[in-house]
């Protein structure tokens, strides 16, 4: 998913040579890489998905707070369909998407907006796979000009369910009355929904799963009750499940080019959020203290360590975090582990013998810059 490219230096300026930087954020206690090309795929890359969806979740949290401060009501609306094993993801995804577009584009929806005070929304697409095949669904975070009463919520749910069934029938699909459309308004109700259909992954350090989590974090949410998310399929493939690998490939090809979050026109401007940041421009580490740099040859040598290619990149970051970003301790680990002499933050290369310990020089010693 990552390749060495001549991108930017520590201050973000274009540089002429490709050096892989290891950086550390002391506030977040996290390490990361710089000058590595990112695929920025929220669908196919678990590393990029975690970075992108967390930034989107934080933005949605601000969005919800601003909307509620203005007296807006909020609701999470989930749309899905009945499906069976053997149906392709593309077929079911296209059906859900087409039904949603048709439902929101006609006079019926304009009437719903006027009746219930619907202002705008943010929607996201989520996919899981289980015994009944692919399960695609749309999560829509909807904003109203007032908090809905229980009577209004009940009426809205009935009208949406009735219209959703009609829209799906036009696409050749059906939806159960109870599950076709689900509408919830409170964070504790969202937590109950996720407990039924999935669960908060360990990477999210929050006490509960809120509206903004369910919308933004769909690609990295874990599933329960026998269903698997795409990244669970990928993990199972890594454990030898060939069928899971085939399913993940189908998912990645089907979702390629799709946008994870879609904001309705005018919502960001109404709340003063500014222009949306592209996935590739999201930076999840505000503070980036330089630790060490590696040349392209050193980076390739690191990846070439026998039996460690898929783990060494993560291992280097974990070691950097454990050592709290200390450049000399990280350099000592690199020398002992891979006989790699990195470039230090001040630009100098550690001479042989500068670090104490039983480390001998070999053909991976100090590089020529």
Image (spheres, rainbow, N blue to C red):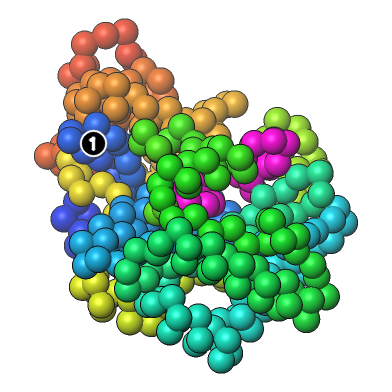
Q: Magenta residues, as a range?
A: 213-234
Rendered position, 265 above or below 136: below
> Whole-percent x and y of residue 182?
59, 58
- As drawn, the residue found furthest toward the right would be 86
The front one of 188 and 235 is 188
> Whole-percent x and y of residue 256?
60, 66
> Would residue 228 appear left or right of 208 to someone viewing this image?
right
Confirm whether the magenta stretch covers residue 124.
no
> Would residue 235 appear left or right of 188 to someone viewing this image?
right
Rendered position, 75 above or below 226: below
Identify the image quadrant of residue 15. bottom left
The front one of 132 and 352 is 132
> Whole-percent x and y of residue 109?
54, 83
> Would residue 325 appear left or right of 114 to someone viewing this image?
left
Q: Residue at position x 52%, y 52% from top?
A: 218
- As drawn, the residue found furthest toward the top would be 358
Confirm whether the magenta stretch covers residue 214.
yes
Res. 268 visible in picture: yes
Rendered position, 120 above or below 107: above
Q: Residue at position x 80%, y 52% from top?
A: 133
- As drawn, the residue found furthest toward the bottom would be 107
- As drawn, the residue found furthest toward the left would be 346
Identify the image quadrant of residue 88. bottom right
Label 1 environment density (alpha carbons within 10 Å; few <14, some 14–19, many ≥20): few
Rendered position, 30 above or below 164: above
Q: Which residue in the structure is indicated by mark 1?
A: 28
Q: Residue at position x 40%, y 54% from top?
A: 212
> Whole-percent x and y of residue 28?
23, 36
The front one of 28 and 209 is 209
Q: Secondary structure at mark 1?
A: loop
Res. 36 visible in picture: no
Q: Residue at position x 24%, y 31% from top?
A: 29
């Amino acid at each position: 998913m990552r390749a060495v490219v001549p991108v930017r230096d520590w201050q973000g300026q274009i540089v002429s040579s490709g050096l892989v930087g290891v950086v550390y954020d002391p506030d977040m206690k996290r390490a990361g890489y710089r000058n590595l090309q990112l695929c920025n795929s929220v669908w196919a890359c678990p590393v990029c998905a975690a970075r992108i969806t967390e930034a989107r979740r934080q933005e949605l949290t601000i969005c919800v707070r601003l909307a509620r401060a203005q007296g807006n009501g909020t609701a999470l609306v989930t749309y899905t369909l009945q499906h069976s094993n053997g149906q392709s993801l593309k077929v079911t995804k296209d059906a859900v998407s087409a039904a949603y577009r048709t439902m929101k584009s006609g006079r019926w929806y304009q009437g719903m907006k006027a009746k219930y005070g619907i202002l705008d929304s943010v929607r996201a697409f989520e996919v899981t796979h289980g015994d009944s095949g692919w399960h695609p669904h749309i999560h829509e975070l909807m904003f109203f000009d007032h908090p809905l009463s229980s009577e209004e919520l009940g009426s809205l749910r009935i009208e949406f369910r009735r219209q959703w069934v009609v829209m799906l029938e036009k696409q050749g699909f059906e939806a159960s009355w109870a599950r076709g459309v689900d509408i919830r308004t409170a964070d504790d109700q969202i937590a109950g929904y996720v407990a039924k259909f999935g669960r908060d992954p360990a990477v999210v350090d929050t006490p509960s799963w809120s509206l903004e989590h369910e919308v933004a974090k769909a690609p990295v949410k874990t599933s329960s009750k026998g269903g698997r998310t795409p990244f669970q399929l990928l993990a199972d493939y890594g454990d030898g499940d060939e069928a899971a690998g085939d399913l993940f490939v189908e998912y990645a090809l089907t979702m390629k080019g799709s946008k994870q979050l879609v904001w309705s026109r005018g919502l960001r401007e109404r709340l003063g959020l500014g222009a949306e940041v592209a996935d590739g421009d999201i930076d999840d580490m505000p503070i980036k203290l330089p630790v060490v740099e590696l040349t392209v040859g050193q980076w390739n040598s690191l990846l070439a360590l026998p039996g460690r290619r898929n783990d060494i990149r993560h291992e280097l970051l974990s070691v950097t975090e454990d050592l709290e970003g200390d450049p000399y301790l990280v350099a000592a680990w690199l020398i002992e582990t891979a006989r790699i002499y990195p470039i230090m933050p001040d630009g100098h290369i550690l001479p042989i013998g500068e670090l104490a310990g039983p480390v001998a020089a070999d053909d991976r010693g100090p590089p020529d810059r």
